[in-house]
Amino acid sequence: MEMKPGWLMAAALVWAFELPVQAQHRLQVTVTPGYSTENFHWSIAGNSAGLQPNVYSELIWRKIQRIGVGVTGSWYFHKNFLLHIRFAKNYTIAGKATDTDYREDNRKSPSYNGSFNSGKGGSTLLEAAPGYAIDIGKTGRLTLCPGYTFNRQAFYLLPADAFTPAGLKSTYTAIWKGLMFSTSFRKNFTDKIYMEPAFRYYQVKYNAAANWNLIPQFRHPLSFVHTANAFGVAPSLKLGYSRVYLHLQYSYLATGRGTGHLYLAAGGDQVTQLNGAAQSTLRLAIGVIAW
């Protein structure tokens, strides 16, 4: 049966009024260029029991600065039900790192201390989360989204001065992947001005792989790996006007105790305790609703 234009318009209006106020467009695409600064560290013990000494080696990256862009698609596929998919790519433009080894417990009697440039690397983020939106009054909306996150980060140790070997190019790649849960509340003050605080919780697995390229005792390109369970939190705030918003987010991710496997050039591997890894990130972005 052929449907006349008048019936088509009526059907479209009925479909539109069934959706929440903010979901009139079934698909929304947002582009978010941004800047972030990050601190990251990890340490291992001398053996798998966490002893000899309790902190044997510690790596610290400070003020890792990155620029990049993210793209988020939000699809309202049935009334209040939605799907968020986000992809972001960031590039490191500056940063510093230190590597310190100890002979005794509690970071006493350093046997080695090196300072490095870490102005190379980056991160890749992919998140997918179905959700449910609840309209609260005429100007508010609460959104609940369980989902999955994959966050890959690459850190470098590079020459910092003339005293550092020119061929140094050690890498440490960390992956945080697993479950997340986010909640946000959007409050519209006018037709164009709004505020949206949000909070995310992560329960993830941590896997890292390193290539210490100038250490002959290690194999290459895989020198050692780290594994552990981790959690994270990420409060954020959006301040929006029409199709543009400012987004400020702080995130903290940390592991519990885990395991480190060191792969030796002479053959075999050595097992040690990963005392923990942690990172804190502050990110500022401008969001533009492109579609």
Image (spheres, rainbow, N blue to C red):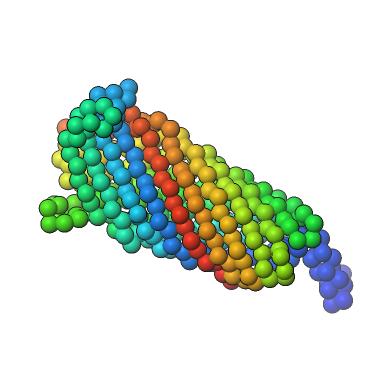
Residue located 32% across and 25% down the image: 50
Snapshot quadrant of residue 226: top left
Q: Is residue 97 left or right of residue 162?
A: right
Instruction: Indicate whether 259 appears above or below 165.
Output: above
Residue at the bottom extreme of this rendering: 5
Residue located 48% across and 61% down the image: 284
List x then y, in percent, for residue 239.
Answer: 60, 63
Q: Is residue 11 left or right of residue 201?
A: right
Q: Quadrant of the C terminus?
A: bottom right
Q: Decide which of 267, 110 is in the foreground and name it.
A: 110
Task: Residue 163: tell me if it is visible.
Answer: yes
List x then y, in percent, for residue 257.
Answer: 40, 30
Snapshot quadrant of residue 77: bottom right
List x then y, in percent, for residue 85.
Answer: 57, 56
Instruction: Indicate whether 193 appears above or below 256.
Output: below
Q: Quadrant of the N terminus?
A: bottom right
Instruction: Indicate whether 45 appears above or below 212.
Output: above
